[in-house]
Amino acid sequence: QVQLVESGGGLVQAGASLRLSCSASGRTSSSYHMAWFRQAPGKEREFVAAIAWGEFGTIGIGIMYADSVKGRFTISRDDAKTTVYLQMNSLKPEDSAMYYCAAGRVFVPNTRYDYWGQGTQVTVSS
């Protein structure tokens, strides 16, 4: 089992930045691929970014983003701290959503991850 706890959400104005953190605990939590998803009210959960475990994620090869956040969001991980980050810059009102951290054995831009956190709310005002 892997437990995931997100933090760092909040209410900001358009153009501002936020950094989300996801702390993972449990057995071999550092050997999972990690991802961020978001879900706005009335919408399906959508992929935001993912990072592979191991050196591929650390050196940037195993990273992917949704087109809507490319160039604005950056995902990174610190395996020593078993923490994944999502740096969000130039936030837009359409980025408002509950953001979820996920962990799994697959590295895919969809919801096929095994473990999920409870989410952290991000609200961007115009």
Image (cartoon, rainbow, N blue to C red):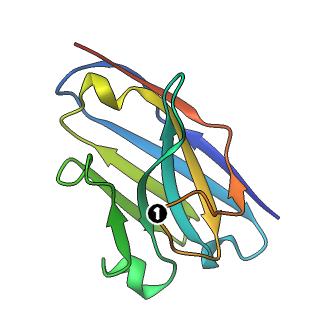
Q: Is residue 8 above or below residue 74?
A: above
Residue matched to label 1: 109
On screen, residue 112 versus residue 19, left or right, reads right
Question: Foreground: 75 or 43?
Answer: 43
Q: Quadrant of the N terminus?
A: bottom right
Identify the residue at image location x=68%, y=38%: 118
Question: Foreground: 107 or 2?
Answer: 107
On screen, residue 70 versus residue 58, left or right, reads left
Residue 100, quarter of picture: top right
Question: Which amino acid does the dot numbered 1 rest on?
Answer: Pro
Q: Seen from this angle, which residue lies furthest bottom?
A: 55
Q: Is residue 84 above or below residue 28?
A: above
Q: Position of residue 31 (x, y in %)?
A: 62, 79
Identify the residue at image location x=49%, y=84%: 54
Q: Quadrant of the C terminus?
A: top left
Identify the residue at image location x=38%, y=63%: 76
Q: Residues within 10 Å of mark 1 (few under 14, many from 20)?
A: some
Q: Is residue 25 above or below residue 89?
A: below
